[in-house]
């Protein structure tokens, strides 16, 4: 064949498990073990491949970092929302006299079901609370309130 270069033979010692994996892989691909070993060595030694792999890993890590930052923000919003609500509720809700407390307990299940239905509807259709809160709320905004 024109343009075909003469190959150099080398001897390599492989662990029996690696040799079995090479033989199995070559058989499944219907390729020679020599060709599979050559391709693996070329891939291992190729700086382009290592750079591409590193870039892909870096890109994926950046995506994970952004997702974690959003999760951290959303969790912070959830915790603060609950804390504000509980504080407000405890401050503004007087204790009920016993007859009214019994009536409230009787109505609690129905009110809870209505709450869960409303929550499910909001989660399904939006908008989400995190979407209503600007991304760039700074600490100076907190001190003003």
Image (spheres, rainbow, N blue to C red):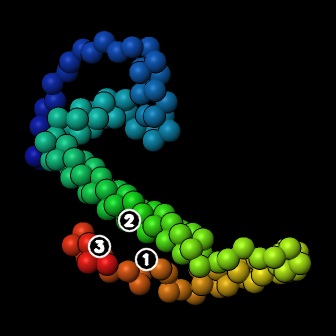
Q: Where does residue 14 sit, x and y in percent of width and height?
A: 35, 15
Looking at the image, is mark 2 or mark 3 nearer the viewer? 3
Which quadrant is the N terminus positioned in?
Answer: top left
Identify the residue at image location x=47%, y=80%: 129
Name the residue carrying label 1: 130
Total labels drawn: 3
User: In terms of image quadrants, where is residue 31?
Assistant: top left
Q: In the image shown, does 10 or 19 lie closer to the viewer?
A: 19
The Cα atoms of the two marked residues, 1 and 2, are separated by: 8 Å
Name the residue carrying label 2: 73
Q: Is residue 140 above or below residue 131?
A: above
The Cα atoms of the two marked residues, 1 and 3, are separated by: 17 Å
The Cα atoms of the two marked residues, 2 and 3, are separated by: 15 Å
Please rate how many residues cluster around mark 1, counting C-alpha atoms within 10 Å: few if below 14, some from 14 to 19, many from 20: some
Q: In the image shown, does 41 or 87 lie closer to the viewer?
A: 87
Name the residue furthest front.
97
**Tag 1's secondary structure?**
helix
Task: Specify which label sits upstream in the sequence, 2 or 3.
Answer: 2
Q: Is residue 73 above or below residue 19?
A: below
Q: Is residue 101 left or right of residue 38?
A: right
**Tag 2's secondary structure?**
helix
Q: Is residue 7 above or below residue 136?
A: above
Q: Where does residue 41 sit, x and y in percent of width and height?
A: 24, 32
Identify the mark at residue 142; answer none if there is no mark.
3
Identify the residue at image location x=28%, y=50%: 57
Identify the mark at residue 103; answer none if there is no mark.
none
- The answer to whether the residues at label 1 and label 2 have Cβ atoms under 8 Å apart is yes
Q: Where does residue 58 sit, x and y in percent of width and height?
A: 24, 52
């Amino acid at each position: 064949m024109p343009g075909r270069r003469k190959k150099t033979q080398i001897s390599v010692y492989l662990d029996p498990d690696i040799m079995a994996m090479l033989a199995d892989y070559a058989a499944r691909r219907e390729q020679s073990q020599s060709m599979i070993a050559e391709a693996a060595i070329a891939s291992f030694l190729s700086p382009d491949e290592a750079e591409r792999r590193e870039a892909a890993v870096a890109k994926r890590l950046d995506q994970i970092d952004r997702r974690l930052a959003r999760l951290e923000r959303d969790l912070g919003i959830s915790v603060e929302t609950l804390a504000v609500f509980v504080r407000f509720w405890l401050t503004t809700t007087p204790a009920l006299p016993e007859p009214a407390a019994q009536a409230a307990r009787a109505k609690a299940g129905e009110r809870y079901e209505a709450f869960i239905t409303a929550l499910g509807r909001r989660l399904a259709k939006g908008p989400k609370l995190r979407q209503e809160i600007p991304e760039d709320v700074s600490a100076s905004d907190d001190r003003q309130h």
